[in-house]
Image (cartoon, rainbow, N blue to C red):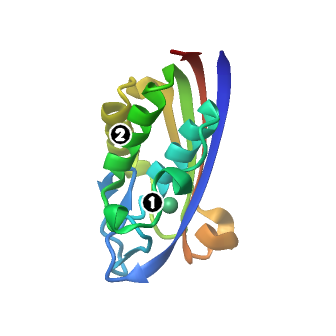
Amino acid sequence: MLKIGFGYDVHPFEQNRKLIVGGVEIKHPKGIGLYGHSDADVLFHALIDALLGMCGMGSIGELFPETDEYKNINSSVLLDKTCLFISKKYRMTINNIDCIIISKSVRIAPLVEDMKNNISQIIKIPTNIISIKGKSGNGLGIGGTDQGIEVYCVILGDIIEI
Ligand SMILES: [Zn+2]
């Protein structure tokens, strides 16, 4: 059955943290990164919530609670585990993924190909069905005022119960 999934995530900037978005480690000019219980990969988290939403299988917070098991964990692992979790209930064929990353200080365009390649490898889908767009936020909101980075993500897919 054709289903749509929607995901959103936001993480605040903090000193002495890595900045990882879509599995890409980025050097921020101010030396700041994103704070979170895991590695705070805001794109992967929005993507996980969109995948779970598409399948009606809950949320990232339910699947990966803020326990020691997931402290500072690489979110690539969480994305992989999410696909495994879904595959126990559904055979999933993704039609396309569309993401918006909002950040004043991080230019997304030069990173898009690497992010697409990372998603492609983990979810095992071709890169040409993945769209990732960066927006500055025009000085408004969390991403636009550089308090953090925000991501919106939608997925359309066909899921068949096993
Ligand atoms: Zn998150």
Total numbered circles: 2
Read off the residue under disc 1. 107
Disc ID at residue 119? none
Q: Secondary structure at mark 2?
A: helix
Who is closer to the viewer here, 108 or 53? 53
- How far across and how far down the image is residue 129, in percent? 48, 25
- How far across and how far down the image is residue 110, in percent? 38, 50
Badge 1: few (under 14), some or many (20 or more) residues near its Cα, within 10 Å?
A: some
Looking at the picture, does residue 83 appear above or below residue 25? Answer: above
Q: Is mark 2 within 8 Å of ligand 1?
A: no
The residue depicted at 47 percent of the width and 77 percent of the height is 13
- How far across and how far down the image is residue 160, in percent? 56, 15
Which circle's residue, 2 or 1, is located before the other in the chain? Answer: 2
User: In 3D space, how far apart are the residues under numbered discs 2 and 1 (Cα atoms)?
Assistant: 26 Å
Q: Secondary structure at mark 1?
A: loop
Read off the residue under disc 2. 80
Which amino acid type is marked by label 1? Arg
The residue depicted at 35 percent of the width and 39 percent of the height is 80
Task: Tell me: 43 left or right of 22.
Answer: right
